[in-house]
Image (cartoon, rainbow, N blue to C red):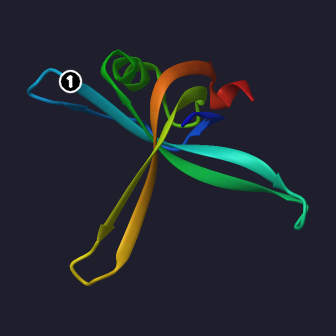
Amino acid sequence: MNSVVIVGRCGQDPEMKYFESGKVKTTFSLAVNRWDTKTKSEITDWFNVEFWDKQAEVAGEYVKKGRQVALDGKLVVSSWTTPQGENRTRYLIRGINLRLLGSKADS
């Protein structure tokens, strides 16, 4: 089963892209904090997120930098080799459901 559930704050205003086919894609980064017991401090993990279609329109309209959101989706992994011969891997969360939780001003 490939399922991801995260809660975090949007790192920048979302970018919406409209395609000739009528599809819509919205992308943004999400900062998720976690506690590191070794350093006894909070660490921020960053995730790239994309939504499609109706959820993309909702994200594009209501998600703003600093806004807290919860989402569930699936992890998508892409691997490729650069022209210089370096192996690269990209991790992306393809969102399915989006929940708006609050704004930076609420905290």
Q: Residue farthest to the left?
A: 20
Q: Which structural element holds mark 1? A: loop
Provide residue 24's location: percent of width, then percent of height: 25, 25
Task: State the image coordinates of residue 43 (x, y, percent, origin top left).
Answer: 74, 57
Place residue 81 in its image quadrant. bottom left
Which residue corresponds to the image point at 72% horizontal and 47% vertical from the top-left? 33
Question: Mark 1 belongs to which amino acid?
Answer: Lys
Q: Which residue is drawn at 77% across and 49% down?
A: 34
Residue 89 placement: quadrant: bottom left
Kindly identify which residue carries mark 1: 23
Q: Is residue 10 left or right of residue 34?
A: left
Q: In this view, does 16 lie above or below 45?
A: above
Q: Percent position (x, y) of residue 45? A: 64, 53
Q: Quadrant of residue 72?
A: top right
In the displayed structure image, the side of residue 91 where residue 34 appears, left or right: right
Q: In which quarter of the image is the C terminus?
A: top right
Left-right relation of 10 to 78: right
Quadrant in which the N terminus appears: top right
For this orientation, the residue located farthest to the bottom is: 84
